[in-house]
Amino acid sequence: MDLREGFQIDEPDVFVPWSVSQAGLRQLLDPRLREVTRGYFTIPCTSLGGLRHGLGFHFDRQRSDHLSELEFYALSARPIDETYAEFQRHFEGAFGPPTRTRPGTEGFALHEWIFPTARIVHLVQERFGPEEHMRIQRLAPLAPRT
């Protein structure tokens, strides 16, 4: 998968460009899209070759009309070792092996994929118990809208 322009969701079959506005995201994903808080939306979906998950859309705080990060999370409570292995398998299937892997916390490695326009991070950290983070962050600034 090429992250230069955005992210492909398989179910629903929608391509979400990094340049999408909050209003544009609503148009693409209504009625499934849920606004959690200002600048943060979620949807249950399938992507990355059959991975069923929740997907969070974070919009830039300074420029609220630009998508800045995608957050992946399990839709149901499952043991963290299961979700960690499942997310890792699907991300490696889609993006290849991580660019960098180093020891993490809670017994789980921290994996990073670095691309010219995006960074993927997979880690577990302590937050009232172990909490998994799987995110794609846009790195390259977008060209101004015309």
Image: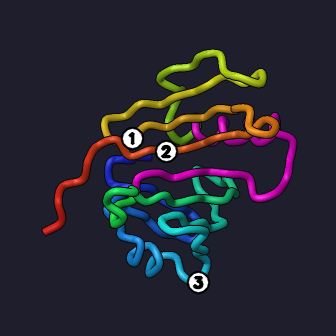
Where is residue 119 drawn, in percent x and y? 43, 37
Q: Quadrant of residue 43?
A: bottom right
The numbered mark, 2 or 3, whose residue comes first in the sequence reads 3
**Which residue is pictured at 86% across the width and 47% down the height?**
78
- For the residue pair 141 and 27, the one nearer the viewer reads as 141
Give the Cα distance between marks 2 and 3: 24 Å
| Drawn side of residue 67 relative to residue 131, left or right | left
Q: Quadrant of residue 84?
A: top right
The residue carrying mark 1 is 118
Within-10-Å neighbours for mark 3: few <14, some 14–19, many 20+? few
Q: Are marks 2 and 3 in contact (CB under 8 Å)?
A: no
- For the residue pair 94 and 102, the one nearer the viewer reads as 102
Asked if residue 79 is among those painted magenta in the image, a careful observer would answer yes
Give the Cα distance between marks 1 and 3: 28 Å
| Drawn side of residue 19 relative to residue 44, left or right | left
The residue carrying mark 2 is 136
Magenta span: 68-92
**Which residue is pictured at 28% across the width and 43% down the height?**
140
